[in-house]
Amino acid sequence: MVKRAKIYFTLIAFIIGFMIAVQFQTVQEPVIRDTRDIWELRDSLSKEMDLQSKLLEEIRLNDKRMNDYASEIKGSQEEALKQTLSELKKEAGLTEVKGPGLTLTIDPIDKALLIGKTIHSVSPITLKRLINELNMYGAKYISIDGERIINTTVIRDINGETKVGTHSLNLFPFNIHIITENMEVANKMYNRMQISPSIDDFFIDNLVVEISKPNESILVPAHVESIRVQNMEPVEDKGES
């Protein structure tokens, strides 16, 4: 019994001693308090607010940059589509074109040599042979009597009248405008046409071809008729299987 009392006494003494030691340590090391005066606090607050303002401004600028980049990317896509559409229209012959080239003028030969004959039209075979030769010599764009030649243009005889598409060639003289890649190609074409067999074909049909000197500014008009696409159907997208 006495032994147990001693143990209790020892434990109580240890606890009391520990509490006194803690209290003494608390008194010796008080909590550090902010001893700055009101002006120092205001200065610190001002600096914090200035930093916050700078961060908000930087966030705003970054948001603006992102919006600008998004608009630029969108604009670039739209511009690319517009450019592609413009190129496709040009290739299809739907736009007016100006460039280096030359002009051929088709006219009946001297009336004194016709011996009573009247020239009403030009042979579609002779005309197509000339177009093929011009293409072989580097023609990029061609118009006949103001009618633009494209891949779907048909030159044919209808009831004794030659037509380029739906345009009738029944008035003389008429011009054929040719645009080439550059003046060098135009000059070569001019020299080759001087000895072209197509010129002789026209002469056989009582027509003469006058070849102009190469010019840096030849105008070929746009194709104005509707382009009909046959034997083509849209493909239905069935998605990935």
Image (tube, helix red, strand yellow):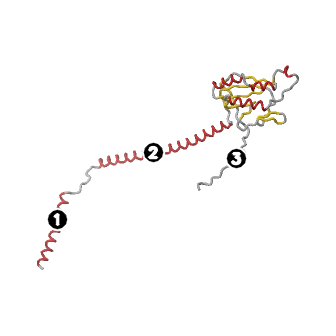
Whether the residues at callouts 2 and 1 have beta carbons within 8 Å, the answer is no
Q: SS for tag 1?
A: helix
For marks 2 and 3, give the one nearer the viewer: 3
Q: Position of residue 220 (x, y in %)?
A: 69, 31
Instruction: Classify residue 239 by image quadrant.
Output: bottom right
User: Most extreme residue toward the top, as rendered?
Assistant: 112
Q: Give the labeled residue for mark 2.
A: 62
Q: Give the labeled residue for mark 3.
A: 232
User: In this rendering, is residue 166 above or below 12?
Assistant: above
Q: Position of residue 241 (x, y in %)?
A: 59, 56
- Residue at the image point whose x is 16% and y is 63% from the top: 21
Q: Residues within 10 Å of mark 3 (few under 14, many from 20)?
A: few
**CA separation in Å, label 2 and label 1:** 59 Å
- Residue at the image point whose x is 63% and y is 24% from the top: 184
Q: Position of residue 109 (x, y in %)?
A: 81, 22
- Residue at the image point whose x is 58% and y is 42% from the top: 78
User: Most extreme residue toward the front, as rendered?
Assistant: 197
Instruction: Classify residue 136 by image quadrant.
Output: top right
Q: SS for tag 2?
A: helix
For marks 2 and 1, give the one nearer the viewer: 2
Q: Label 1 amino acid?
A: Ile
Specify which label sits upstream in the sequence, 2 or 1: 1
Q: SS for tag 3?
A: loop
Q: Is residue 197 left or right of residue 78?
A: right
Q: Position of residue 234 (x, y in %)?
A: 67, 49
Specify which label sits upstream in the sequence, 2 or 3: 2
**CA separation in Å, label 2 and label 3:** 50 Å
* Mark identifier at residue 20: 1
Q: Label 2 amino acid?
A: Asn
Whether the residues at callouts 2 and 3 have beta carbons within 8 Å, the answer is no
Q: Is residue 46 left or right of residue 161?
A: left
